[in-house]
């Protein structure tokens, strides 16, 4: 279509291009594999961008080319005629200005707002190279550098009023560099990303936001110090997951100290089964495999002598054709026997009667038997003798393996109603053998009840009970809680927790992997704050 749309055509154009309703479309045509829309503005006057003074005095006109969203997979280019106006306000610094069409044009822009918004969404989701590949599949040409520039040009979101703040660190380079992510716990939305995890950095940010009332954090000393410096009026809340994780680490150390109690002691050892009596050796060349081979060889040669073909023999005996050929070409069955099936003479053969006699007399030590037959002239190895004696030995009773330290720690940390019956019985047997682990289980489940039911007021009594028992690993855990007692008590009382913060830390790891770890901190910060 190379003419101005009218009637029904105009209605269809308005449906397909609703953002062009403020301009007059002169023509729509195909151009270089895409769609070219020629248009001009409708209004007679414009408003100065600096002083907002309307003006109808035109200075000149020129044409702008704007890339728009694709239509049916085809690129769309808008050739728009715009006008330049004089500003009639003598106090304004602007002498002339260009009219702008709302939702269609922006100063110095070569893309429509719709196309720019789409590219910004692609860039935030996939960043550079991957975003450029997706944009190309969508029919839009945009380089990776262009997409990254679009991300940098986006403004930071408004922080607003934050009353409950979540704080946690993440690695920009694991083991070397770390940053800090700040989360609004009311909306679960990241509000800022700090360059490091130092106390002063967090304190400076908190001084700029005195409205913070609660700070959810892990037990890192730097964040505790920064929160105290920057927001002394705020209540610090230790994360319950980290408290439980630290307790499990202490429980695991305690279980490791009593590793010997995990194995069941064999008080009544089962009676050993009688040793197998040595079987007399087979005649040379007489094994089950050798006997079957000789029988097959004789049958095949018998049928062959009777005039049967090899294929007929294979069908009658149910054997493979190539196997029958191999048997037919062998003059004797010994040509078909190899390795262990040949029953080759062994250095032990001459001493087997003596070994049988000594075995029945009760001598089952292979080293002693080796010494005795060596004096009688044996020149073989210890391995050959051991292999011959192995079938005579009775199998040793195998006791079930002891559960690992980590497995027992998991049983202690699991709610009793969710523990499998077999695991419950195993744990009960272990506790019966070790009173220290029984005490450990009691303290662990008491802390779990206090944590899940948020009974922070019971923490001092729990600490006193732990210190009264001989559990060094739990003593260290209790001492750490006392150093941060207020925050831990608050964490065991208030409903706030750092779970949403940990979720955003995992999302940051995903964003870092998308950028192959080579992006700048500024780009990472933009994507963390703006990606929904």
Image (cartoon, grey):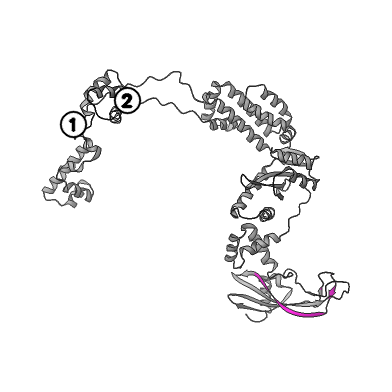
Q: Which residue of the protein is positioned furthest toward the right in this rendering? A: 91
For label 2, the crowd category at 10 Å Cα-Cα, with few meaning under 14, some 14 to 19 and many 20 or more, is: some
Q: Residue 460: percent from the left, percent from the top?
A: 72, 27
Using the image, tell me which numbered label, if any, was put on residue 283: 1
**Residues rendered magenta in the picture:** 47-68
Residue shown at the point (36%, 21%) measured from the top left: 272
Q: Residue 58: percent from the left, percent from the top?
A: 80, 80
- Asked which secondary structure carries label 1, the reply is loop
Q: Nearer the viewer, residue 1 or 245?
A: 245
Quarter of the rendering containing residue 149: bottom right
Q: Is residue 480 magenta?
A: no
Residue shown at the point (59%, 27%) measured from the top left: 254
The C terminus appears in which quarter of the rendering?
Answer: bottom right
Q: Main secondary structure of the magenta part?
A: strand
Q: Is residue 496 visible?
A: no
Q: Residue 188: percent from the left, percent from the top?
A: 70, 48
Whether 222 is drawn above or below 266: the answer is below
Q: Nearer the viewer, residue 392 or 299?
A: 392
Q: Is residue 49 magenta?
A: yes
Q: Is residue 438 visible?
A: yes
The residue beneath circle 2 is 393
Quarter of the rendering containing residue 51: bottom right
Q: How many marks?
A: 2
Whole-Å distance between the Cαs marked 1 and 2?
23 Å
The N terminus appears in which quarter of the rendering?
Answer: bottom right
């Amino acid at each position: 279509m190379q003419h101005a749309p009218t009637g029904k055509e105009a209605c269809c154009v308005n449906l397909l291009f609703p953002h062009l309703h403020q301009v007059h479309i002169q023509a729509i045509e195909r151009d270089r594999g895409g769609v070219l829309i020629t248009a001009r503005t409708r209004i007679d006057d414009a408003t100065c961008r600096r002083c907002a003074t309307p003006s109808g005095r035109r200075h000149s006109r020129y044409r702008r080319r704007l890339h728009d969203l694709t239509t049916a997979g085809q690129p769309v280019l808008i050739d728009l005629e715009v006008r330049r106006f004089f500003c009639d306000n003598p106090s304004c610094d602007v002498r002339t200005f260009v009219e702008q069409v709302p939702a269609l044009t922006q100063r110095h822009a070569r893309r429509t707002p719709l196309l720019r918004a789409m590219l910004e969404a692609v860039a935030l989701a996939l960043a550079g190279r991957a975003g450029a590949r997706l944009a190309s599949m969508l029919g839009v040409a945009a380089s990776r550098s262009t997409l990254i520039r679009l991300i940098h040009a986006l403004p930071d979101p408004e922080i607003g009023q934050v009353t409950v703040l979540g704080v946690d660190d993440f690695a920009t380079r694991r083991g070397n560099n770390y940053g800090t992510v700040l989360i609004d716990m009311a909306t679960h939305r990241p509000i800022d990303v700090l360059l490091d995890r130092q106390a002063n950095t967090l304190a400076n940010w908190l001084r700029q936001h005195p409205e913070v009332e609660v700070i959810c954090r892990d037990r890192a000393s730097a964040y505790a110090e920064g929160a105290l410096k920057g927001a002394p009026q705020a209540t610090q809340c230790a994360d319950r997951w980290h408290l439980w994780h630290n307790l499990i680490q202490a429980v695991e150390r305690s279980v490791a100290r009593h590793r010997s109690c995990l194995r069941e002691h064999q008080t009544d050892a089962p009676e050993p089964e009688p040793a197998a009596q040595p079987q007399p050796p087979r005649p040379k060349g007489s094994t089950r495999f050798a006997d079957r081979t000789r029988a097959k060889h004789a049958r095949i040669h018998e049928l062959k002598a009777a005039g049967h073909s090899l294929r007929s023999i294979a069908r009658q005996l149910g054997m493979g054709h190539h196997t029958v050929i191999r048997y037919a070409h062998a003059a004797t069955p010994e040509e078909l026997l190899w390795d262990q099936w040949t029953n080759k003479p062994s250095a032990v053969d001459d001493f087997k009667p003596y070994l049988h006699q000594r075995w029945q007399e009760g001598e089952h030590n292979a080293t002693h038997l080796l010494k005795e037959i060596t004096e009688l002239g044996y020149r073989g190895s210890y391995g050959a003798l051991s292999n011959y004696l192995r079938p005579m030995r009775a199998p040793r009773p195998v006791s079930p393996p002891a559960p690992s330290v980590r497995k027992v720690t998991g049983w202690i940390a699991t709610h009793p109603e969710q523990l499998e019956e077999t695991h419950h019985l195993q744990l009960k047997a272990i506790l019966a053998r070790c009173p220290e682990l029984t005490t450990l289980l009691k303290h662990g489940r008491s802390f779990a009840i206090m944590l899940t039911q948020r009974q922070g007021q019971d923490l001092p009594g729990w600490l006193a009970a732990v210190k009264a028992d001989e559990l060094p690993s739990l003593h260290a855990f209790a001492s750490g809680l006392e150093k941060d007692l207020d925050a831990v008590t608050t964490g065991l009382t208030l409903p706030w927790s750092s779970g949403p913060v940990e979720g955003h830390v995992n999302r940051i790891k995903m964003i870092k992997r998308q950028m192959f770890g080579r992006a700048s901190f500024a780009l990472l910060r933009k994507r963390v704050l703006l990606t929904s």
